[in-house]
Amino acid sequence: MVAHNDVLAAFRHQVDWCEQLGSAFTARLLRILADDIEAGGPVAALISGFDEEPVAAALALRVAGAFHARALEEADARLVALYDKAATDGGVHVGDMEMRSILLDDLVGASEHYQTYLKSAPQTNEVGRSAVLMAGYLMIADRFSLPLDIAEIGASAGLNLGFDQFSYRLGVLETGTSGSSVRLAPVWTGGTPPSACVSVRHRRGCDIAPMDASDARDRLRLQSYVWPDQPERLARLRGALQIARELAISVERMSADVFVEDVLSQRQPGAVQVIAHTIMWQYMPEPMRGHIARMIEVAGASANEEAPLAWLRFEPLDVKDVPTLSLTMWPGGDRQDLAQAHPHGREVNWVARPTGPSGKSGRDVS
């Protein structure tokens, strides 16, 4: 059993992160739940048997997701009304006592739902990260002028594998699929990625616990982990879920190291083989990270212009750092840090060296 103080610290830590990432409602919800844990109330009883490290296991987000799922299912009228207000005004007109009553009454009345929700780790499959990845894919396409074979590790439901079906405004660059139901336009500073034709020949993804965009329960679960006072994230998630269903994207249940080995063994000329991942590297054991890196580097040594290799990752360089978009391409094997960005892709600072004969990266369409 996890120590009481460790659980409280994990909830308080997540409160801080929610505030920093722009979700005042979820921060407030978790603060109310933390107070109940401290008082030994129903939330304390709910998590009393939880035996994983609470920060690493994202315990607070599991609990928050369980409440949002109940609201999305319209299981309780008072909870639905609270979450509707969260989406429109952040729930600021609902007092803490009333909010506490709504939450705890539903928890007590639907305890089996909440216990079940604690058994699985959150998966957000954040679609906004595709804006960051797209900038990297533009760099790859500009370098090789070949289609891409995308292999994403930690792909969840594979929503970011449908990136080429989204539309983008990356600084002054308009790209992607015009008129898409998913439109990504992050706040952009710094330079601009190159204008290039990005086409996908093959797309594959793996996850140790994959989600299925065609399964209604998985779609509900993914939506439940989106913070309710960020309705734009929920809208683009729903759009990406529909695109994933149209593309029939299926994510393989496989460990990352086995997946990468399989992908690299099946490389075919005529496309750039891309290994991609976002905000998942730190959660893998160090030996597995080292093994994957070595496999990619060995494969890179045999890459050529007809069968290039690229490693694109959007990860913190250190767990406390803002995530960095990094790219290594073979032949050559030189690594370049392209951008620093918000974990959800909300803001991007492009720092890559300019490319092209004009000395500028990209094209001005404004």
Image: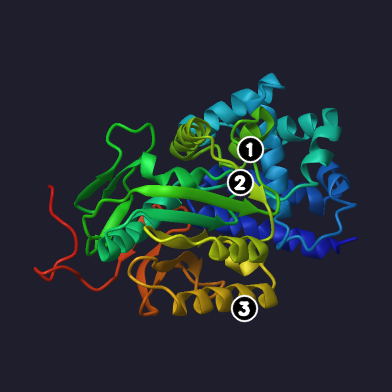
The residue carrying pointer 1 sits among few (fewer than 14), some (14 to 19) or many (20 or more) residues within 10 Å by Cα, namely many
Please say if the residues under marks 3 and 2 sit with CB atoms less than 8 Å apart.
no
| Among numbered discs 1 and 2, the one appearing first in the sequence | 1
Instruction: Identify which residue is drawn at 84% across, 61% down.
Output: 4
For the residues labelled 1 and 3, the Cα–Cα distance comes to: 29 Å
**Percent position of residue 311, x then y:** 45, 68
Please say if the residues under marks 1 and 3 sit with CB atoms less than 8 Å apart.
no
**Percent position of residue 229, x then y:** 51, 38
Instruction: Identify which residue is drawn at 48% across, 30% down.
Output: 246
- Looking at the rendered structure, which numbered label has been put on residue 212? 1
Instruction: Check disc 3 and report the residue beneath it.
Output: 290
Q: Label 1 is placed on what type of residue? A: Asp
Q: Quadrant of residue 149?
A: bottom left
Looking at the rendered structure, the secondary structure element under dot 1 is loop
Front residue of 130 and 335: 335
The quarter of the rendered structure image containing the N terminus is: bottom right
| Among numbered discs 1 and 3, the one appearing first in the sequence | 1
The residue carrying pointer 3 sits among few (fewer than 14), some (14 to 19) or many (20 or more) residues within 10 Å by Cα, namely few
In the picture provided, is 37 more to the left or to the right than 163?
right
Please say if the residues under marks 1 and 2 sit with CB atoms less than 8 Å apart.
yes
In the picture provided, is 81 more to the left or to the right than 121?
left
Front residue of 355 and 4: 355
Looking at the rendered structure, the secondary structure element under dot 2 is strand
The residue carrying pointer 2 sits among few (fewer than 14), some (14 to 19) or many (20 or more) residues within 10 Å by Cα, namely many
Check the image and report above or below for 195 versus 258.
above
**Percent position of residue 46, x then y:** 85, 44
- Looking at the rendered structure, which numbered label has been put on residue 251? 2
